[in-house]
């Protein structure tokens, strides 16, 4: 084998190191509308930025504390962080391929040659000892960018894992806020049911008194009792839903399901809704969404893997070296005459297996095409998610206005119907009907206010609000560059 001097090989590597096969990643472009279709439903007002800690805008200290605790203790987030740590470790491993691999070895052996190997040699003379020690270095000369493309792919995969973690933070925060709001809404509906049951119980008492006085009928008594029982039947259902909501919040924050019952079972008002907001433009949205960023990073990684596969079309050069010592006497192992050395340039080229190489390139191309389609689909889903959230929130606010008036009027009508009934100016049917409408109106109002608040959370989630951008991600959850 021809011997190469190390400076000659290093100069050759530097001369063609810029050669990197395979396509370079280019950020894909998609035509997006200049503004959201429902942009007229939003106005710019003084509210927190969409990617800030939006839950503080609800001005509920308990909600704020629950979200902060969840960001630290949620197990899904811990799993996502472990996945990022794994990706980061694989990236460090890939980077080591750019450097020489240096190992050390030593050996002490007592050897006896067979009679076939040493014919006519006495048995005692067939025994020998061997001692060796060496430092071995190997370095793949990345002349065609195989290693660089692999590092590029791993780096993009790590960035995708970080974006996945950010996206999960958005989702978890939104779920905590929505679950908390739904809990308060259910507690309000439970209060409405109990208050209406108390009113209907008083109506039943009046009907019973009229019946006992001979001025009523058993039909009136049965009808009033049936309405009361129907209202009371709503109570256990709502109580179960309240308990389920408390369990969900506790588990989201990394606790056992019963951990927050004592703290959450006391009813509290729904959190205050922030004012209307400026949704910005679709282009701004796509720059914020971590799921879109993750899809782009995965496309980048798939594009780089095409280069990894393409590099196998070209020869692979490996520079190896050894510095060591060998002797048959342990005492002479490190004497001057025992040293050994080796410098070698190895060439590995699978040109005879070109069919397999081209098949791997085709597979990498297909992977990249699939990731491009996934990216484009992610963009469309992000736009759809935002459009849906905007229209639902805007319409829920309008519905709230109508139901507020309906609840006020129905309460007034029920009160007047009861007064007229006590005065004998109307029959029981009007009272029961007015109370039924009052219950339905008040329940509907509590429900729409809950949906208004949760739809606001959905808007923030769609616009990538919900994770603390004011604190760098790696500082808050322990990410490393």
Image (cartoon, rainbow, N blue to C red):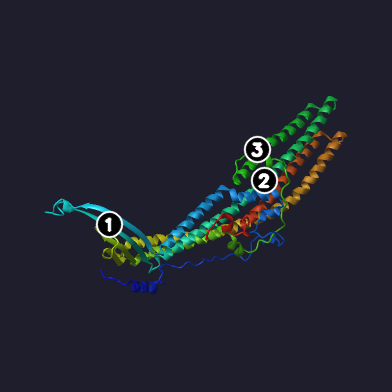
The answer to whether any part of residue 48 appears in the image is: yes
Q: Please identify the quadrant where the N terminus is shown.
A: bottom left
Location of mark 2 (residue):
182
Marking on residue 387: none
Q: In which quarter of the view is residue 101 placed?
A: bottom left
Q: CA distance from mark 2 to mark 3?
A: 13 Å
- Tell me if label 2 and label 3 are in contact, CB under 8 Å: no
Label 2 neighbour load within 10 Å: few <14, some 14-19, many 20+? many
Marking on residue 330: 1
Q: CA distance from mark 3 to mark 1?
A: 81 Å
Q: Nearer the viewer, residue 387 or 311?
A: 311
Element marked by disc 2? helix
- Tell me if label 2 and label 1 are in contact, CB under 8 Å: no
Please say if 124 is above or below 217: below
Residue 42, horizontal then vertical, whole percent? 69, 60
Element marked by disc 1? helix
Residue 277, horizontal then vertical, whole percent? 69, 59
Marking on residue 240: 3
Mark earlier in primary sequence (2, 3): 2
Please say if 402 is above or below 142: above
Q: Nearer the viewer, residue 281 or 431?
A: 281
Residue at the left extreme, as displayed? 120
Residue at 45% over, 62% down:
153
Label 1 neighbour load within 10 Å: few <14, some 14-19, many 20+? few
- Tell me if label 3 and label 1 are in contact, CB under 8 Å: no
Mark earlier in primary sequence (2, 1): 2
Q: Nearer the viewer, mark 2 or mark 1?
A: 1
């Amino acid at each position: 084998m021809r011997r190469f001097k190390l400076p000659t090989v290093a100069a050759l590597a530097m001369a063609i190191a810029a050669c990197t096969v395979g396509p370079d990643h280019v950020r894909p472009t998609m035509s997006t509308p200049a503004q959201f279709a429902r942009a007229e439903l939003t106005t710019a007002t003084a509210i927190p930025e969409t990617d800030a800690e939006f839950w503080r805008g609800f001005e509920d200290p308990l909600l704020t504390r629950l979200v902060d605790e969840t960001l630290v203790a949620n197990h899904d987030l811990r799993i996502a962080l472990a996945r990022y740590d794994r990706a980061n470790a694989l990236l460090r491993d890939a980077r080591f391929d750019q450097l020489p691999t240096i190992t050390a070895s030593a050996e002490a052996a007592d050897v006896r040659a067979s009679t076939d190997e040493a014919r006519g040699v006495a048995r005692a003379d067939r025994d020998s000892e061997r001692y060796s020690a060496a430092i071995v270095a190997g370095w793949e000369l990345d002349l065609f960018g195989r290693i660089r493309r692999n590092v590029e792919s791993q780096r993009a995969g790590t960035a995708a894992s970080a974006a996945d973690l950010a996206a999960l933070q958005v989702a978890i925060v939104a779920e905590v806020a929505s679950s908390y709001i739904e809990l308060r809404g259910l507690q309000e509906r439970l209060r409405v049911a109990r208050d209406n049951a108390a009113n209907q119980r008083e109506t039943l008492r009046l009907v019973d008194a009229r019946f006992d006085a001979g001025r009523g009928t058993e039909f009136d008594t049965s009808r009033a009792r049936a309405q009361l029982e129907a209202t009371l039947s709503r109570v256990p259902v709502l109580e179960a839903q309240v308990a389920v909501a408390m369990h969900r919040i506790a588990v989201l924050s990394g606790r056992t399901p019963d951990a927050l019952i004592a703290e959450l079972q006391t009813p509290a008002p729904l959190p205050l809704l922030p004012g209307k907001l400026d949704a910005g433009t679709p282009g701004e949205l796509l720059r914020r969404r971590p799921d879109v960023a993750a899809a782009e990073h995965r496309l980048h990684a798939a594009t780089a893997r095409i280069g990894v596969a393409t590099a196998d079309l070209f020869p692979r050069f490996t520079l190896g070296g050894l510095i060591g010592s060998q002797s048959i006497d342990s005492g002479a192992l490190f004497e001057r005459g025992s040293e050994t050395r080796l410098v070698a340039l190895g060439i590995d080229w699978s040109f005879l297996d070109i069919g397999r190489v081209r098949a791997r390139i085709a597979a990498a191309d297909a992977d990249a095409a699939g990731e491009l389609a996934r990216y484009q689909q992610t963009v469309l889903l992000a736009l759809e998610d935002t459009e849906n959230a905007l229209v639902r929130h805007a319409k829920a606010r309008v519905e709230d206005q109508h139901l507020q008036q309906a609840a006020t009027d129905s309460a007034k009508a029920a009160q007047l119907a009861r007064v007229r009934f006590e005065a004998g100016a109307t029959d029981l049917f009007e009272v029961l009907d007015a109370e039924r409408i009052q219950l339905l109106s008040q329940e509907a109002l509590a429900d729409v206010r809950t949906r208004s608040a949760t739809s606001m959370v959905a808007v923030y989630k769609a616009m990538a609000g919900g994770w603390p951008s004011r604190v760098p991600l790696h500082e808050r959850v322990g990410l490393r560059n």
